[in-house]
């Protein structure tokens, strides 16, 4: 008999706490379950087999979606990474699936050869290769586990179930993890800027940080332009504007001198926000490898020049040039 | 249209298609749709190059330079000389 681990559809308070930490990106590599074969309820030889990643959010989404059903769950070792990211990295893949089919001895507990995979696993799994090499048929279920009850009625997915969604709520889900991930670098940069120019500097760097995380994800579809860098340039210029205007009005210098004084900050804030938003591409499901590669080669030099000119103007000013 | 075509590397060869319907099932962006005798590429510009259609197309009717559209991992890879994608 193949060995399996018993599981349920119940989410305990310990699970909930783990979900909160995972959503905040805290202890990022610790949200994993043991890979292998699980029995949900009391499955028999005709029960369906669902495949998932060993990330707690993936596994828990699946077992709760299968509430009051008896099924087997085959958990692949994706090193605690979700299905789609693991599929992109190859850990949720043909090799790992075949290896788990063999090592768990799943063939001995069921009398069919059908596996239901999450659709996003298809990036790493080749259904015909699995069939040729293991004899198992791969069936791609919906993108989201929560659609499984509907899907399992006739094993047909609506076009909506097949699409990756990225609505306001999905985007807001990303905000906590983005804030947590960038918090320590922010504190360091803000600390340095504080010594260079006091609270005014802290205020603009925090604004730039919140703009490229919170505001960016909320406004994403409505910021004109398609590229993330140009979205960031627009957002960055908007963030820089009040600071530049404020600084400009706080002086009795001539217009040209005033402009020379505020230009560095405007350039640096805009370039920083654009760089941060470009770095958000991997967090979203809407960017392509070719598109991002082109954006990097097109905009990184521009952003570097903007920031470089900004720093240069500040340095020149320290030597009394441009005053 | 010309600029749109450059956004991704997706290529579809309908003559090789056996109309199995798998591409329209695995695509998370609705790029493909089942047709009468072959799949139809209805929204090429939406392709994010995840590669799911290509590796699940048995007759090899779909070609795409698959990869993860993540600037952070590409920049990190360029700086450290590592193989992308590295999520960290």
Image: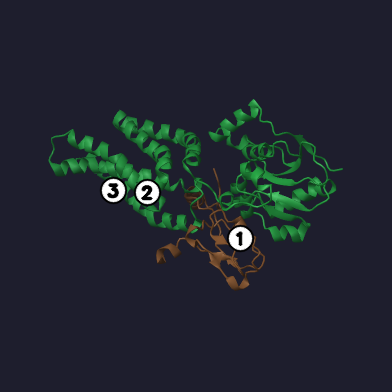
Q: Secondary structure at mark 3?
A: helix
Residue A309 — which label? 3
Q: Chain B, which colour?
A: brown
Give the left or right position of residue A293, taking residue A138 as reference: left
Alpha-carbon span between mark 3 and mark 2: 21 Å
Instruction: Provide the residue designation for mark 2.
Output: A231
**What is the chain identity of the residue bearing mark 1?**
B
Residue at numbered disc 1:
B23
Above or below: residue A147 compared with residue B18: above
Query: Image check: A200 left or right of B61?
Result: left
Residue A62: % across, % down: 66, 40
Q: Residue furthest top?
A: A13
Looking at the image, residue A112 sits to the left or right of residue A261; the answer is right
Question: Alpha-carbon neighbours of circle 1 within 10 Å: few (<14), some, or many (≥20)?
Answer: many
Question: What chain is tagged by disc 3?
Answer: A
Label 2: few (<14), some (14–19) or many (≥20) C-alpha neighbours in 10 Å: many
């Amino acid at each position: 008999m193949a060995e399996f681990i018993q599981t349920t559809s119940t989410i305990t308070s310990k699970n909930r706490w783990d979900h909160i930490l995972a959503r905040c990106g805290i202890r990022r590599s610790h949200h994993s379950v043991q890979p292998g074969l699980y029995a949900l309820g009391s499955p028999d030889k005709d029960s369906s087999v669902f495949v998932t990643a060993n990330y707690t959010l993936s596994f828990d989404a699946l077992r709760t979606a299968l509430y009051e059903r008896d099924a087997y769950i085959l958990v692949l070792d994706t090193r605690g990474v979700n299905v789609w990211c693991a599929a992109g990295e190859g850990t949720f893949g043909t090799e790992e699936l075949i290896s788990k089919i063999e090592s768990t001895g799943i063939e001995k507990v069921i009398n069919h050869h059908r596996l239901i995979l999450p659709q996003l696993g298809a990036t790493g799994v080749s259904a015909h290769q699995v069939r040729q090499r293991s004899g198992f048929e791969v069936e791609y279920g919906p993108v989201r586990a929560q659609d499984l009850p509907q899907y399992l009625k006739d094993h047909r997915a609506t076009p909506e179930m097949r699409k990756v969604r990225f609505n306001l709520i999905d985007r807001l889900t990303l905000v906590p993890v983005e804030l947590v991930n960038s918090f320590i670098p922010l504190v360091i940069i803000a600390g340095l800027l504080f010594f260079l120019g006091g609270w005014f500097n802290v205020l603009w760097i925090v604004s730039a940080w919140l703009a490229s995380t919170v505001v960016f994800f909320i406004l994403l579809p409505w910021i004109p332009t398609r590229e993330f860098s140009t979205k960031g340039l627009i957002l960055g210029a908007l963030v820089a504007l009040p600071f530049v205007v404020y600084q400009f009005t706080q002086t009795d210098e001539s217009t040209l001198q005033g402009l020379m004084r505020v230009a560095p900050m405007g350039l640096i804030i805009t370039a920083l926000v654009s760089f941060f938003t470009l770095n958000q591409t991997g967090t979203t499901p809407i960017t392509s490898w070719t598109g991002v590669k082109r954006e990097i080669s097109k905009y990184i030099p521009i952003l570097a020049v903007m920031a470089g000119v900004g720093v240069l103007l500040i340095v020149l000013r320290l030597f009394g040039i441009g005053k | 249209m010309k600029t749109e075509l450059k956004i991704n590397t997706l290529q579809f060869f309908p003559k090789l298609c056996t109309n199995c319907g798998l591409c329209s099932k695995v695509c998370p962006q609705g790029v493909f749709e089942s047709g009468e005798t072959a799949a139809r590429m209805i929204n090429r510009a939406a392709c994010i190059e995840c590669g799911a259609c290509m590796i699940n197309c048995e007759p090899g009717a779909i070609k795409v330079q698959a990869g993860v559209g993540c600037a952070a991992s590409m920049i990190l890879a360029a700086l450290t000389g590592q193989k992308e994608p590295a999520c960290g």
